[in-house]
Image (spheres, rainbow, N blue to C red):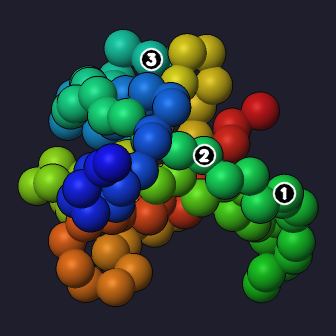
Amino acid sequence: MTCKACSDVQVLPNRVSIEKPRENPGADGHTDLENAANWSTVAERSCRFVTKGGREGMVFQQVRAEVTHVIEMRSDPVTRGILPTWRLRMGCRVFNVTAAYDKDERRQTVYVEATEVK
């Protein structure tokens, strides 16, 4: 027999690194976000991936990628602070954050919408 608190615990099978860009602009005043050295790891967290599928569309004559994954994480001060300028890394896979939110405002789960970088 298990208690209610134990049965409410979600299994989060994956592990990701949460990264934010470093503040070290080059000679032109911009940070090259293609260079892995310009990202710093904030934390590592367990998570669950939900693949949404993705496509690209035209918005104001620019190609814009749509969300390809929703990533569930337990809520804590770091996950609640994830910004759209950050990214997630799982092994060699990289996901640019589109949005991060607490859907029901209960501070239990943070959902991160992301687009996988090819």
Q: Earlier in the sequence, mark 3 or mark 1?
A: 3
Q: Is residue 29 visible?
A: no
Q: Earlier in the sequence, mark 3 or mark 2?
A: 3
The C terminus: image quadrant: top right
Name the mark nearer the viewer: 2 or 1.
2
**Residue 100, horizontal then vertical, whole percent:** 39, 66
Q: Toward which corner of the image does residue 41 lie, by quadrant? A: top left
Hey, what amino acid is under mark 3?
Ala
Above or below: residue 87 compared with residue 100:
above
Query: Which residue is under mark 2?
Result: 49
Disc 2 to disc 1, C-alpha distance: 12 Å
Q: Are marks 3 and 1 in contact (CB under 8 Å)?
A: no
Between residues 60 and 51, which one lies in front from this camera angle? 51
Name the mark nearer the viewer: 3 or 2.
2
Hey, what amino acid is under mark 2?
Phe
Query: Which residue is under mark 3?
Result: 36
**At x 74% / y 66%, what residue is drawn?**
66
Disc 3 to disc 1, C-alpha distance: 26 Å
Q: Residues within 10 Å of mark 3 (few under 14, many from 20)?
A: few
Name the mark nearer the viewer: 3 or 1.
1
Query: Which residue is under mark 1?
Result: 53
**Residue 5, horizontal then vertical, whole percent:** 22, 59
Above or below: residue 48 compared with residue 103:
above
Does dot 1 land on a helix, a strand or a loop?
Answer: loop
Q: Is residue 47 left or right of residue 50?
A: left
Between residues 7 and 82, which one lies in front from this camera angle? 7
Q: Which mark is residue 66?
A: none
